[in-house]
Amino acid sequence: MAEIAFTKGHGTGNDFVIVADPDGELDLGDAQVAALCDRRFGIGADGLLRVVRSSRIPEGAASLAEEPDAEWFMDYRNADGSKAEMCGNGVRVFVHYLLESGLADLPAGSTLPVGTRAGVRDVMRSETGYQVDLGRWRAEEGEPTVRARGLGVPRPGLGIDVGNPHVVVALASDDELDGLELTAKPEIEPSPPHGANVEFVVPREPLVKDGVGRVRMRVFERGVGETLSCGTGVAATALAVRDWAGRTAPDHWRVDVPGGTLGVRMFAAEDGEHVALSGPAALVYSGTVTLA
């Protein structure tokens, strides 16, 4: 038995157990992560963020090759213990923890590079908290259909990759969105080889106000279940709705999720179009826990 220190944090209700392990000394198994994230017998969270130097984790080598200043690596694990490529809410909380604990500095107007399994992500301060450049995105080929409890028939979806996989499904009304039973995992056909997060979305009325697109979303995250928010899912949702809306659709979006509101911005970069996510991050409490 070992006792470890932790901090609980969240971004629009998407909550995380944060464990500082700068020198990469912890070897957390899937079952240990799942126990820490268990909401009845553990601390309770949608996932775990291990704060480790890129030089002290094997996956960090690629991050340092991409950006030598990416000192810190976000080792993100889903609530079931499985490893995940990226987490848009998690990286904001991760950076907030680095700053609050004195492990990094982020002056106004500058960016802080963070290593992830999806590549280096640059984070800067914003009016609502932090903005993270999620990098290039891509629409997936194929026409997946999604079955979900509460929907009478399967619905078509659009596959979007923003460093991790998503399938976005448009619904007709708020009643349809509210009627979903997301305690059951939606079924995607054909099934993605590594699974995918599934977002269900309805437009606000009007869809565009003052040049900003507005939608409402719920999400089922692979390895977790329904969460109050999913940062990369919010970005995927905005990208999908912009695609459906056509050429006149804006590049700025506001996405309402059960845990709050997040902003999305699409912009041109040298290597293609990028998508950025902005929103708050909070640290709730700290403590110690005995690790079995």
Image (tube, grey):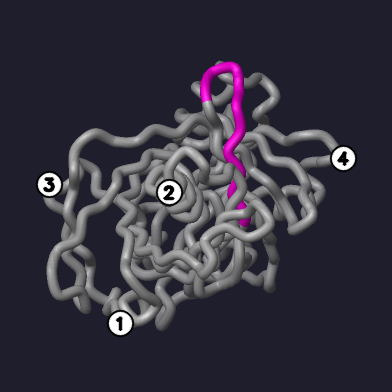
Alpha carbon separation for disc pair 4 and 3: 46 Å
First along the sequence among labels 4 and 1: 4
Residue at 52%, 54% (x, y): give it.
231
Q: Which residue is mark 2?
A: 245
Q: Earlier in the sequence, mark 4 or mark 3?
A: 4
Asked if residue 31 can be seen in this view, the reply is: no
Stretch in magenta:
263-272
Camera-side mark, 4 or 1: 1
Instruction: Name the image quarter holding the C terminus.
Output: bottom left
**Front in this rendered view, residue 46 or 180:** 180
Q: In the rendered view, would you say 115 is above or below 195? A: above
Residue placed under numbered mark 1 in the picture: 179
Badge 1 amino acid: Gly
Question: Which one is earlier in the sequence, the residue at label 3 or at label 2?
Answer: 3
Whether residue 54 is in magenta: the answer is: no
Q: Height in image: 263 above or below 35? A: above
**Residue of label 3:** 190
Q: CA distance from mark 4 to mark 1?
A: 44 Å
Badge 2 amino acid: Ala
CB contact under 8 Å: marks 4 and 2: no
Alpha carbon separation for disc pair 3 and 2: 25 Å
> Residue beneath label 4, please?
107
Mark closer to the observer (4, 2): 2
| Above or below, 181 relative to 208 | below
